[in-house]
Image (tube, grey):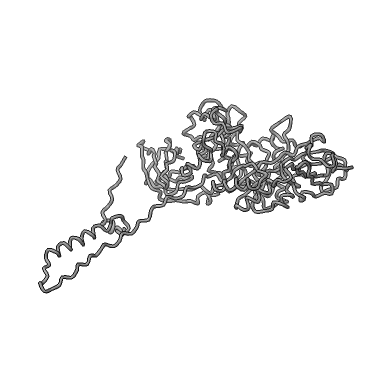
Amino acid sequence: MASAPRARSTVANVEAGAHPSNRRGAWRPALILIAAFTMVAGLTYVPAATTQVPAVETIAPAPQKAVPAVKTPAPPSYPISGYFISASPQYSTNFQKLADIKEFGGDTVITFGTLLKPATLDSLPADCIIDGVSCAKAAAGSKKVHQYFTFLDGSRWGSSALKCPGDRKVTSNGKSYVVLFFPTVGQGCASPSGEYDVVVAGGSRATADDPSSSLASAATKLGMKYYAGLPAPIKRTDLAYLPDLSYMGPLTLFTERFLQYHAAVNNVPGLAGFYHHTEMPLSNSSTFDPVLALYQMQNRAIHRLLPTREAIVSPYLDARLNKVFISLDKARDGTRRIAQTSSGLVLNIAVQDGMGTGKGGAFSSNDANSAVDRFAASIVGKGSWASKYVAPNRDYFVAAASGVSGTGAVLWANLEGMAPEAGSNACGDNLRGQTTKARMDRQLQQMANARKVISFMWDSYYTCTGSGKSLKDQLESGLTTPIITDTTFRASTGQVQIAGFNLKAGTARVRWTAQNGLAKEKTLKATGSNAAYGQLHGLNDRLEMITVSVGKTTLNTSKRYVVTVTNEWGVKSEDFFSQPG
């Protein structure tokens, strides 16, 4: 390792334009000169006997200016800005959770939806009673009931939900419910056929705060965005991966009532939009047309009733070679088909990266022949990444970006903030286990094409202490880690551009092979920095770019080049391998 260059003399520094007063000890030569002159004067000056010798005035050197301490820049936030959360019936709990997420760098929270379930009179909530009779039966009176449903979302629905004459708000046995009537034919309140579908909704404690309203209120106060989960149908009994749309009519009417209620009580800045609870793979197969029909129906309703609000949908990857995998072409076309359901609103397509379920692989070309980690191995078995997965997640996000291009939809990423349970990473009673920061950094490297990164799930994958330290604490202890997501090497100019997170004010070590086969290496300070790179290019707004110049050179296109960045916090990135192209 080369030694540090010797510092130049004070004179040289002055000639170069560096004022000595700005340097520690720069006034010492002047002080020595004054002392020498005083000594010489003392030896040669003999005063006359009649002359009173004046007191010698001692001239102190100018006081040294204090050199300001170099401030270490504050650490950035982790490049995830949204989290799935569970809602609480207590406003204070919701507010504190959102405040914690904001302090951690998040600005968005998302809740899952609730199922609108077909029911019988006997399966309705037993504690919803009017005068000793089931609340639905009592409210129906002489009306003919076609079908009962429950929507037990734990909310405390207010009187704004009551739109039709038969609708009732019920407080029974300390619980709060609403009973809502929908015509089986047409819309409005009156049914031409005389038959009605009846929904019993709510089920919160009568004294509780409404979870959705309190989240919207907390998000507004904190300047955050809240996406509420939409109503969803149950799954089919014959094909459990598809929604049961046999009651699409009642579901459509109830979705509209749900949105009308939000427009009446939650029409605040914190309510940014809604989340599609029903999931599908990132596939172009017509098998999933029922899911697309559901998305389109609900998107139309949102755009009509709350036209300034957005929607989120989160399709999942499955790149496992030993399963019915999704090819890159299918992923591109599947993304486009989802985007085409937007019906005029802004639709954010947050692709699940599959690293928490073992369905996707975050690996680079340099890792392709390396063994999968122990978490993935618990799902796909032992072997190399390339032997277990069709392609790395990066390629799927590139395909998805191509799919949304020109549709008006926005590509997000849903980083799965957990790992397959592998025996030593249990996270409470969750189905999956706790992951690691190093694994999440690798996941982030694959998502450069996404405008925003959200994550499943704050509680409790980020807060459990399965390994003795919560994931949140792990991330906080490594916020300054530089994460490279992409590089370009222009040999003709010597310019190397490096994109990623936490790169600014850094130095880069670049290793490459010239066309003549000679290995080259240079460590250089960045000659250019663009902190707004992501914003300017429609990517993650926390994505940065730095540029270094290695000088005009040649590049052997059959050999990978390697870039490593050390940032302003003095933290070094992992080696990032790139194939010249």
Query: Is residue 357 in view?
Result: yes
Q: Residue furthest bottom?
A: 50
Say which quarter of the image contains residue 339.
top right
Given residues 350 and 223, the one toward you in this image is: 223
x and y percentages locating residue 470 in the rendered image: 53, 38
Q: Residue at x 51, y 46 (%)?
A: 77
Q: Residue furthest top?
A: 382
> Residue placed farthest to the right in the image?
142
Is residue 484 in sight in this rendering? no
* Number of numbered discs visible in the structure rendering: 0
Q: Position of residue 54 (x, y in %)?
A: 18, 70
In the rendered image, the quadrant that contains the N terminus is: top left
The location of residue 495, given as percent across then percent down, is 41, 47
For the point 63% across and 47% down, the residue is 92
Residue 526 pos. (x, y %)? 40, 48
Identify which residue is drawn at 36% across, 40% down: 521
